[in-house]
Amino acid sequence: MIGSILAAEFTDTEKWVVNSFWGVIAAVMIVAALRVVTTKNVVHAALWLVVVLAGVAIQFIFLGSEFVAVTQILVYIGAVVVLFLFGVMLTRASMGDDESVGEEKRTMAALVGVMLAVVMAVALVDTYGDDQLIIDEPQRVDEVSDAIFSQYIVPFEAVSVLLLAALIGAIVVARKD
Amino acid sequence: MNALLAAALPLAAEAPTSVSSVTRDANWFLENVWIIPLLPALSFLAILFFGKRMPKKGAEIGIAAVGLAFVLAIITGFAWLDHRDNFDGPLAESPATGIEPAQGDKLEDPTASHEGDDEHAIAVVSEDGTSSADSVALTADPVDDGHGEEGHAYVAVQNSTQWFQSGGIEFSAGTLVDGLSVMMLFVVTIISLLVHIYSTDYVGGDRRYTHYFAFLSLFTASMLFFVVSDNVLQMIVGWELVGVCSFALIGHWWEEKPNSDAALKAFLTNRVGDVGLLVGMITLFFAAGGGKTFDTLSITNTINQGGVSHTALVVAAAALMAAVMSKSGQFLLHTWLPDAMAGPTPVSALIHAATMVVAGIYMVARLYPVFWEGMQIPGSSINLLATVGAVTLVGAGLLAFVQTDIKKVLAYSTVSQLGYMAMALGVGAWTAAVFHLFTHAFLKANLFLGSGSVAHAVHSFDMKKDMGGMRKFMPQTYKTFIIGSVALAGVFPFAGFWSKDEILTGTGGWGILGGTGGPGTYTFHLAMGMIGAALTAAYMTRCVYLTFHGEYRGNDHAHDDAHADDHADDHADDHAHGDPHESGPRILYPLYILSGFSIVIGFVNFPPGIALIPDGWHERFLHFVEPAGASYFPGVGHGTPSYSLAIISSLVAFAGFGLAYRYYFVKVDNLAKSTGQHLTELPNGLVTTRGWARAGHKVLVEKYYLDHLYTGIIAGGTKGPIAKAANWTNQHLIDEVVDTAGRTAVKTGQQVYARIDQGVIEGVINGSGRISDATGEELRRINSGKVQNYAAILFAGAALLAGAFIILLAL
Amino acid sequence: MILNQFLLLAAALFCIGVYGVLVRKNGMLVLMSVELILNAVNINLVAFGALTDDVGGEVFALFTIAVAAAEVGIGLAIVLLMYRNRRSIDLSEADLMKG
């Protein structure tokens, strides 16, 4: 599948193509993410979120994790976003402008965000420099499943119980008495 | 220790130590005992989903399931009797090694060397070739040492399967059947069955009738699950499940505040012990399970063979003690048990008297090597377990004297009897403790259900206000209650006599009474046991007098339904208020059955040396229940019973009875008759005339001030200062810091603004000033209550800390 | 490809998500921003998994997706409840915790 484009024996030109493709995706993701947090329209925000989530799925493919990418699309774009749209409908949130947020609050939040970004960027660049990431073949699904059902069985069971609890909790919280 | 073991274990002497007394190959019923807890568990679900739609509102499902479980438990019991005496199939390797069961030749059994040895790989108990052993089982003359080893080793049956494994540790689920668990299966199922039947009448018409039966089923399932579990993890699960059921059933009538408070108190007190349980089990897992296995038998095997450091065992035993103290109501943590009487009476009988509260005792009995080694039971004369038990025994017995609520008398009596059991385990009288558990379950269920029957008639539990003279109205209940009381007081030949006497024997020492040969010389505990016997007889006499004798006091006052009447409103007015009347058959028949057991159940363990009893009848209980000689059980020595001890303990109990009789049946009764008043105490008794007696009475009424200690001093003492400290920190420290930070930021901003106002980089500085200003403003209004502001501070703080960290690393 | 390009992208997404969480008044939009943060974390997990050639990174990314689904369910339930109680999902009005 697309994972094979990552094969190590690329020529320089091909590498350049792959890298610029990656750059375009990343740029689209950043822009879309910014729109998610800035757009005044809730439905638009949800749709921009779809773009980001799809971008993340593509990132997973770049990283050779096809299974996670597929799960990302199924669960996030298939279920979570639909949940959001339902939520929007149920709460009859204004489809139009979100009421204006105070300038002050914006500044503060931006400050915090930039601070975090700087700290993380410095730390990452400092630590990893230009470490190469060599992905010669995609991760096999059977390896993932074997790991889940042997080594990671306890977290797996915990997650199942958590999902059940969340299911019940959501019903309890949201039901009308 | 090793000498003892070797003496008790002649068969295993040459077997490799990794061979345990476990088999995975036995009778079908012994292997598949998991069905028994499964039945009530299914019944719980069925009642939950379909109960309301059934003609009897779900009660029939519960009764059917528990009845079936009871039948299976009986069959399992018989299968065990057969297995105990005749099994010579293959033994399993020690579960810790994880090696598959070896073939039959591992068992060096001198008497099993009859023909067909090679066939034993599959075999359970073959009909042929074991006839000789059969006759041993039936006519069974005890071996001279009284240990009841009749040629066959004690082999438990384990059937476990891997649940999952993670990180190299296998989590298994399985069942372990030996005499102890078979005994518990029998006790739990029969009492649960009788309580189910009794409840159909007692809580009939209740608004949560179906819910009630669902939880009875779930409780039964959890208790059975706990009893048959083969590893300590499973035990923890069962332990917590019974706690949850207890919580739900104590709070069955949660609309009334005291009931829900009692449920909470029970739950929270038990949480204290649960922490101990968890710590203890984890300690065992690492110390004795090698960090690999939770299996009960491999843990006890390892400990028994001396492979575990004493310190680890002391820690484990002490931590497990906390669990025992909370669940089995031992002194200091027993306070929840009397309050738990807020639940429906059948629940008190099943959970808070007969079964759940003995979970702690069962756990100690199951993990006995931990306590045997950790508490240094053999050869000692005092240890924590025995002393806590002895203190509980006497302390709770005294408390039973000042109760006016009939159920609370029985509750303290239960605590006291549990003290007996803990003490017996502590002094090394394992069998006596388990035997007392066995007999006590029947007697106490009998007494509780009897008290429920009375309360059902008078709509109250208050002996002093609403009872008295019930003998005339409820002759059947009276008879069964008397039998239960007499049996509990330890009168020959009722059930309580045998088990209590065995405990006293087991304390060892005290040569005058001839009680020698126990694992240690626990003279103090023998004395406490004697005092406890006198107290038991005395408070039961008082209870019987106040409830059944004298004149009926129920019509003394206007009958308002508000007081202590936990089911009157559910019963509408189908009982005409007037004279109480006898309860119906669904209440009486369980009482008949239980009082029958109270009479005869003690006969299953005649001590050796009673000449009148046929030889084969001695110590049957010990033979079938105590894993003597099993590799996972320490070689407990047994005290030699003597007539003199039995006679003296009977005299002591009789003295207690006589004093109470003289006070209530003679003095109070006469005075009441001569004055024509309804008296419950003498107006000029000791308590009113003597200062020290009044003080003692006050201490007892206040329950040794334990509740004050917990809620007032410990909870209040920690809650208050913590709240105050938090408030102070909030007021002074945080506010100060925030204010200062805010002010500084504003000032900095202003300074910067003022100085470089006209500077070249005006815009940049301006912006930074304004940001500082804004930050300052935000910080000042930090207590806005808005989550987002808190989140902003959180992230900013994290970023700052991370930044500082990076800079530090870079330097 | 170098590791840092993924990590920096994830860091950018994370910071944008934090900004959204802090600045949005609408409860739904806050939840969406939380999704951005979770996705950033997932990219990190998978990238490090690829670096060390360990399947654990992917497994935990899958767990995160599952947990995120649970989180959205509960979050939306809370938003719905808030809407029902106050006819508004404006978080700036939710200040019952005010000290």
Image (cartoon, helix red, strand yellow):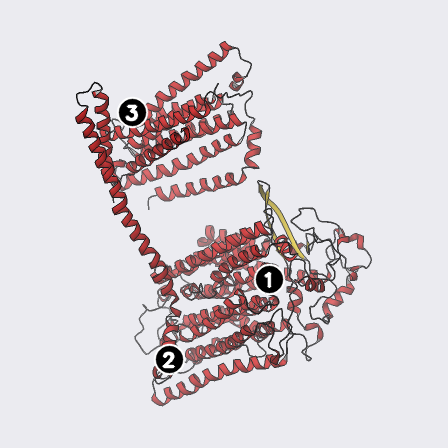
Apparent side of residue B341 relative to residue B622 in the rendered image (left or right): left
Identity, as a three-letter code, of the amino acid under mark 3? Thr
Q: Position of residue B53 (x, y in %)?
A: 45, 53
Counting from the top left corner in percent of width and height, residue B716 is at 33, 59
In front of the other: B225 or B590: B225
Q: Nearer the viewer, mark 3 or mark 1?
A: 1
Q: Report the side of A14 relative to B769 (left or right).
A: right
Q: Are both tags, 3 and 2, on one chain?
A: no
CA–CA distance in space, label 3 to label 2: 81 Å
Q: CA distance from mark 2 to mark 1?
A: 41 Å
Q: Along the polypeptide, which appears first: circle 2 or circle 1? A: 1
The location of residue B420, given as percent across then percent down, is 53, 70
Q: Residues within 10 Å of mark 1 (few under 14, many from 20)?
A: many
Label 2, secondary structure: give it. helix
Chain ID for label 3? A
Q: Secondary structure at mark 3?
A: loop
According to the image, label 1 marks what residue?
B372
The label shown at residue B692 is 2
Pointer 1 chain: B
Q: CA distance from mark 3 to mark 1?
A: 71 Å
Residue A39 numbered mark, or none = 3
